[in-house]
Amino acid sequence: MEPVAAPRGPLRDGERVLLLDAKDRRYLVTLRAGGTWHSHGGALALDPLIGAPEGTAVQSASGMAFTAFRPRLADVALKMPRGAQVVYPKDAAAIVMEADIGAGSRVLEAGTGSGALTLALLRATGPTGRVVSYDLRGEFQATARANIEEVHGGVPPWLDLRVGDVRDVASGPDRFDRVILDLPEPWGVLPALDAATEPGAIVCGYVPTTVQVQAFVLALAAHGWLHLETFEVLHRSWHVTERSVRPDHRMVAHTGFVTVGRRTAG
C-alpha cells in the first residue's frame, strides 16, 4: 500500500468533505453520486459538489447555505466515530512536538483508543517510520482501524495494530525511540521499557488526574528517567469583529496532563 498523498483539485465521488453553515457549525459528509444529505437545514443534494473545487457554496432544499472543504486532521479527530474518548487536537499537537516525533521515528503507543492520536503519529512519522499501537480492548481497536482506514484508504504499512498488553514488547525484538502511554496506570509499563527502548528515548504519558500524574512522575524519577516536564494545554478561541475582540464564552480547558521524560544510559 502506497502512502496516501494529500488530495488536491476538484472534490471527488467517495471523498469526505467538511460542510460549514453560516454559523460555522461543521458536518463531516461523504460525497456519493446521486446522494442526499439531510440536516436541520433541509435536504442537500451532493452531486453539485462532485467535481467542484474546494470552497464551493451550495444550498439545501430549504435555502440554507453550506460551504464545502476537505477536512483537516483536527476536524476528522473530533468528528470520527468513537469507542474511547479521543485525544483532542490541542493535546495531540503538543505530544507530537514535545516527544519530538518526526519522519523515521519508531513509536510505541499504548492505548489506541479511537485512533485520533494514532493518526497524528502516522502523519508525523511517515512511511520511513514505524508506529506500533497496543490496546487491551479489541472493540476499541476495531473502531480505530475503521477510522484509520477511512483516512488512509487502508492500514498504512508503517502501522502495526496489536490487541494485548503493551508490556509484551519487553520479550520481543522491537526497539523504540519514542513511547506514548495513554493509560490509566502508565507507571506499570516502565519496567518493560528497559528492554524495549534505547538510551535517549523519550516517553510521553497522558493522564487526566493529578493523582495519576504524580504517581507517573515519581515512578519515572525512580526508574532514572530525566528531563521530566508536566504540562496541560488550554485552548481558548477568540471572537474577532470590526467592533470588538473578545474571548469566546467557551473553551477547551483541562483534558489531560502531558508528561515527558528522557531515558538515560545508566
Image: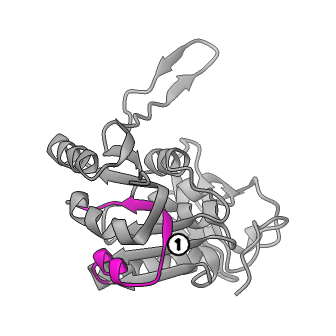
Residue at position x 68%, y 74% in the image: 15
Q: Compared with residue 123, is residue 50 higher up or lower down, i.e. above or below?
A: below
Q: Judge by depth and name the residue closer to the eye, 46 or 19.
A: 19
Q: Quadrant of residue 247?
A: top left
In this orientation, which residue lies closer to the viewer: 7 or 48?
7
Q: Residue at x 77, y 58 (%)?
A: 54
The quadrant where residue 4 appears: bottom right
**In the image, what residue type sits under mark 1?**
Val
State the residue lying farthest toward the left: 211
- Residue 169 horizontal side relative to residue 178, left or right: left
Magenta segment, which residues?
164-184
Q: Quadrant of the C terminus?
A: bottom left
Residue 164, image x, y percentages: 30, 83
Residue 189 picture quarter: bottom left
Q: What number of labels is visible?
A: 1
Residue 181, above or below 237: below
Q: State the residue position of label 1.
A: 131
